[in-house]
Amino acid sequence: MRNNRSVAITGMGVVSSIGQDITSFAAALQTGKSGIGYLQRNIDLDIPVKIGAEIRGFTLENKKGTIHPRMERIINKIQKCVRRSPEPLHYAVAAAIEAWESSGICDVDFDMERVGLVVAGNNLNQHLQYDLYEKFKKNPEFVSSSYALQFMDTDHVGTLSELFGINGEGFTVGGASASGNVGIIKGLQLIRLGIVDVCVVVGAAAVFSPMELQAFYNIGAMGGKIYHDRPEQSCRPFDIDHEGFIYGQASGCIILESMESANARKTKILAEILGSSIILDGNKLSDPNVHGEERAMASALKQANIRIGEIDYINTHGSSSPLGDRTELKAISKICGNEKERIWINSTKSLTGHCLYSAGVIEAIATVLQLNGGFVHPNLNLERPIDETFRFSKETYNDVSIKVALSNSFAFGGINTSLIIRKGEY
């Protein structure tokens, strides 16, 4: 068992409401751009809140035009692999192509049996199912035979593995809002166990139908009622006027690679994952738990073999839920003690909304960009913090020295996850 292998991040890609590639996403983080507005889909919802951070103006065909010619083999496969595929898969493919290209693996003769694939998320085609069901009721024979593949989440795995020629281990993982972090951790474990040298981790987009959004509203999880006339102000993590999460869409991809492999091909090390943790509360409900969140952070720190005094920045789960925000701050306070006055804290969800399945991957990418860019993005709409003793970034802070970060993702069902990420050396 090779569980002490160092693991690097060597590639990243993103499609989101605030940027449809890494360059535009990084710029949006630094300027504090909000992707939240009125929903353009699901407008027939019977709820007073029709706010979200949707991906708009994206087509995979346009994305193809930005791909470097050295990726010709993949470009030629896109039409065959993705033709007539559901929307979330288009986002996943675009994010994965950008990450793959940026990693430079396409430039070397790599053993594809040593490359793995993890797709984070479950029930990935809910809007497709909703649309098809209406047609199915009228005419069952209408349902395309391709739906037999598309309704299973493994359609993402099959498509991406065929597109890139991945022949190592691959699977999907589900952890609700913590799926992204769970995916990263499972990829990390594959590399540390020596099963693969590279793992492509894709956080899939949650493209919900009216049913899922209605259910979230009914359970009291969604915010946006107070600021419905100002949607960009509706997501307010850690602010006294927070009232629930704001739905977001995004797909992100990171390339994990053993440090030996990355160094052998002399590629850029964007970041290193030092430690990780998945902890259960033993609770099927949506209630967050201080002890579980504290244990997740403590376990990740222990695995990384670092002290809280070495953490410079925390990318919080920060969903804008009153109970969730307060619970997380209590857990951070227990872990950090007086260090909480020194450590930078923000929530990427204040810009992107809550991207659910992909949130962990999107926020890991945001963390790496801030570490390497020497800035901390603003925690938007934080006018009256619920606890003034923390070092929140109410605005963009540039030229900051942050080298090691902690990134949290928590989920319904008592799932608590944390990552420890160190700035890359390149």
Image: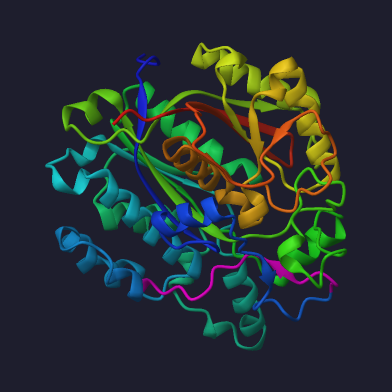
Q: Splitting the image into 4 quarters, where does residue 205 fall?
A: bottom right
Q: Is residue 422 above or below residue 116?
A: above
Does the magenta portion include 137? Answer: no
| SS assignment for the magenta stretch, majority | loop
Can the viewer see residue 409 in this picture? no
Residue at left 55%, top 17%?
A: 310
Say which of 41 and 150 sits in front: 41
Nearest the eye: 196 or 234? 234
Q: Residue at x 21, y 61 (%)?
A: 68
Residue 230 position within the rendered picture, expressed as x and y whole percent measured from the top left: 77, 69
Q: Which residues are magenta?
A: 47-60
In the image, farthest residue toward the bottom: 138
* Residue pictured at 67% horizontal, 52% vertical: 350
Q: Is residue 117 left or right of residue 134?
A: left
Query: What's the image's color scheme?
Result: rainbow
Residue 218, position as x, y percentages in the image? 86, 60
Q: Does the magenta-highlighted stretch encompass residue 51?
A: yes
Q: Is residue 163 visible?
A: yes
For image coordinates 38% across by 60% down, the residue present is 93
Q: Quadrant of the C terminus?
A: top left
Q: Quadrant of the N terminus?
A: top left
Q: Quadrant of residue 191?
A: top left
Q: Position of residue 161 (x, y in %)?
A: 31, 52
Residue 424 x/y as whole percent:
37, 30
In the image, residue 73 sits, relative to residue 413, either above or below, namely: below
Pick the front one: 364 or 83: 364
Residue lying at the far left in this picture: please name it: 109
Rendered view: 46 above or below 377: below
On screen, residue 364 above or below 230: above
